[in-house]
Amino acid sequence: MKQLFESIVSLAKRKGFVFPSSEIYGGLSSAWDYGPLGAQLKQNIQQHWWKTMTRHHEDIVGIDSSILMHPRVWEASGHTENFIDIMVEDTITHERYRYDHLSEEQRAKNISPKGNPLSEKKPFNLMFETAIGAMKDTAQKLYLRPETAQGIYVNFRNVLNTSRKKLPFGIAQVGKAFRNEIVTKSFIFRTCEFEQMEMQYFVTPGSDDEWFQYWKKQRTEYYKTLGIRTSHLQLHPHGENELAHYAKEAVDIQYNFPFGWQELEGIHNRGQFDLKQHTSYSGVDLQYFDQEKNEKYTPVIVETSVGLTRLVLMVLCDSYDEEELENETRVVLRMHPVIAPVKLAVFPLVKKDGLREKAHAVFKQMSDEFSTEFDVSGAIGRRYRRQDEIGTPYCVTIDYQSLKDNSVTIRFRDSMKQRRIRIEEIADVIRASDKAYVRMGESQ
Ligand code: GAP
């Protein structure tokens, strides 16, 4: 499994999905940059999530709130007081650990994973501090938001007044979040700067248990429609001592990463905590007036929250496959075509006799609708392999026959099967194949 993860990380770096941040200065641990393929993959996943949440749910709208917020927000939300991890240090190696990440035995014996005595437990607030204003003595202390959710709660009234939504309804948002994690690890799995895709669903008190079950099911189904192997997904309900300070009930959707089962997404019943806190700290009434019942109450919030960057890692892990062919091992990313960073690659069989020009014209035509690559170098077989490695679902080859009758060969990534179609049919074939996509190798 360690070797598998190393292969995935190596491919991600080699092919331009992810680079270490500020690499020419030696890199910055726990921050990563997304290269041409990674940026496109991230954007595709984000768009897919956004479409699923907003366009497929007429009762959900989207917003984009700022990273910097009034410092009172974090007092009201409980983050200044409670967003704390307990840190311990190995007294010999000085390595730091999150206390809750140690095994029961290590905690009972007060030893580190290396077997050395541990230091005293120290509380550690995960919020990054910054300041606004030119003068140090008058500057106002601010925080980089550790979750995007609070930007939604403080806009609850604005959205309600402008969108004329009635309960139940949701607000979705995608954006950066920052946490000063004690230990960052496993490539882009846990980082200090990351992106979240969060949706806050506001419901009538008393209906929250039902909505919690609804969102648990919806979000699990979401991963199945994205072609993620169901054998690699499981639900983990939070026990009493695992619950975040705001949560009444919580369940994690976990994914079986090469380094073990880990949280991918959290679904939380946050009760009335956040809106009541903001009402009390801001003095602005965030209750909802229910016209039918002719009464005012504070809605209950059911939240779905997933790390976009963590989802990128999950997609890379889930899609990575090494397939034994007759004379070689084929590395292929079997990801769903709707999120593949390159949807279509166009090749001329050879560079001469007008094939290059014809292929380039097809590439230009397709680029408007699909993320398309044009590749002229190397044997066709090698060009297919290059596209397999980055998950390109469709390759089109222009050959001498194409000059005569405008037909091309389209080749499918997973089955490696080829079909002869007309140039005018390419877009339709791609759209239909995207819709009909079924992940191969579910049993893996
Ligand atoms: N608003 C609720 C909230 O933030 P969370 O369980 O702390 O809940 C939600 O975080 C999701 O954000 C996680 O399931 C994970 O996917 C992602 N996430 C949290 N911390 C992260 C980190 N340090 N690096 C990458 N992703 C992270």
Image: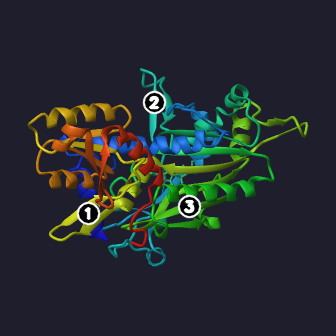
Decide if residue 141 is on the left or right side of residue 53: left
Q: Quadrant of residue 190?
A: bottom left
Which residue is identified by label 2?
131
Using the numbered discs, state the Cα–Cα distance from disc 1 to disc 3 in whole angstroms. Answer: 26 Å
Q: Amino acid at mark 1?
A: Glu
Specify whether residue 93 is in view.
Answer: no
Name the residue located 31 percent from the left edge and 31 percent from the top edge. Answer: 365
Numbered badge on residue 252: 3
Q: Quadrant of residue 160?
A: top right
Name the residue located 41 percent from the left edge and 47 percent from the top edge. Answer: 339
Mark 1 sits near ligand 1, with its Cβ under 8 Å away: no
Q: Amino acid at mark 3?
A: Asp
Q: Position of residue 146 (x, y in %)?
A: 50, 44
Q: Position of residue 362 (x, y in %)?
A: 27, 35
Quarter containing the C terminus: bottom left
Q: Nearer the viewer, residue 182 or 263?
A: 263
Q: Dot 3, crowdedness within 10 Å: few (<14), some or many (≥20)?
A: many
Whether pointer 3 and pointer 2 mark residues with C-beta atoms closer than 8 Å, the reply is no
Numbered badge on residue 6: 1
Q: Dot 2, crowdedness within 10 Å: few (<14), some or many (≥20)?
A: some
Q: Position of residue 260 (x, y in %)?
A: 41, 69
Q: Kindly give the residue lying farthest to the right in the view shown.
A: 294
Q: Quadrant of residue 212?
A: bottom right
Q: Dot 1, crowdedness within 10 Å: few (<14), some or many (≥20)?
A: few
